[in-house]
Image (tube, grey):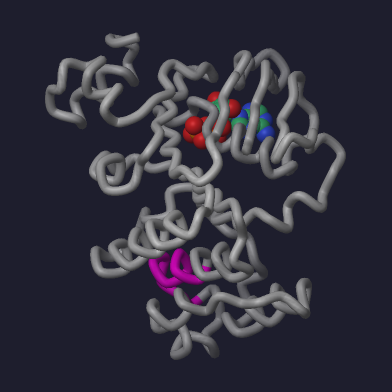
Amino acid sequence: MIEINNLNKAYANLHVLNNINLNIEKGKITYLVGPNGAGKTTLIKSILGLIKKYDGSIKIDGKLINGESDYRNIIGYMPQIASFPENLIVQNIFEMVKDLRPNSYCDEELIIEFKLKREMNKRLKNLSGGTMQKVNAALAFLFNPNILILDEPTAGLDPVSSSLLKDKILTENKKGKTILFTSHIISELEDLAQRIAFILEGKISFHGSLEELINMTGGKNLERSVAAIMIGKVA
Ligand code: ADP
């Protein structure tokens, strides 16, 4: 589904992505994990076409994405921090996004589940961090995309909202959606992940199932195992 081959990205002398080869499987939930600064966001932005200059190739459904933009219609993206003009009210954001795709089916389940209807007249600058996160999540799922890319989707959400979002991720995956998400919350590895990709200093150091990860690390406490991989003690 998303095939990444020999992907290299540098900023000046900083080699951020170092020959990444990764196949993000169709219909699976892949958990992308790695320490701060490992290159997760750079990888995601490359897939989204927000970064265009890199060496190597990215294919979605067999087609090279370089220079293309239509493929983005099948992707729902939830960024860590959304940058909308702060003076807009929540309703404006949903209207603006819906106007971009006037004849599309809209999945409003998260708007309802997160009780966002009562937030619609508030200015973005007055929203709590968690509510903004809910708006971002509802936008990512709005057009029923085949691929969902979620950058720390549950960060800042209360436990009820976090559970709702995780249920939504699982429900959409059962319908066949491909989901790539990043998180530092290790319990989400067990809750959600079907495949796990570790990125360390711009390199994929592990890609496999939870079972393979546990076998590799000797089945000890999961958080400690993940930490061991992150500092390069298991490879
Ligand atoms: P992660 O998402 O894993 O925390 P990032 O992909 O955001 O990591 O960043 C990887 C590295 O690339 C970091 O060292 C970061 O400072 C650097 N970096 C990211 N974007 C830029 C940029 N636009 N210019 C220069 N360096 C950048």
Question: Residue farthest to the left?
Answer: 220
Is the residue 148 above or below the residue 164 in the image?
Answer: above
Q: Quadrant of ligand 1?
A: top right
Q: Nearer the viewer, residue 4 or 78?
A: 4
User: Magenta stretch: dominant SS?
Assistant: helix
Q: Nearer the viewer, residue 185 or 145?
A: 145
Is the residue 10 above or below the residue 163 in the image?
Answer: above
Q: Nearer the viewer, residue 119 or 139?
A: 139
Residue 32 inside the magenta-drawn segment = no
Image quadrant holding the N terminus, namely top right
Residue 177 location, x and y as percent?
52, 53
Question: Residue at position x 44%, y 90% from top?
Answer: 118
Question: Residue at position x 13%, y 28% from top?
Answer: 221
Q: Is residue 214 left or right of residue 141?
A: left
Residue 131 inside the magenta-drawn segment = yes
Number of callouts in the render?
A: 0
Is the residue 51 above or below the residue 21 in the image?
Answer: below
* Residue range highlighted in magenta: 126-135
Residue 5 location, x and y as percent?
67, 20
Image quadrant holding the C terminus, namely top left
Residue 169 location, x and y as percent?
41, 58
Question: Residue farthest to the front?
Answer: 175
Question: Residue at position x 67%, y 38% from top?
Answer: 47
Occupied quadrant, residue 114: bottom left
Residue 9 location, x and y as percent?
69, 22
Question: Residue farthest to the right?
Answer: 67
Q: Is residue 150 left or right of residue 86?
A: left
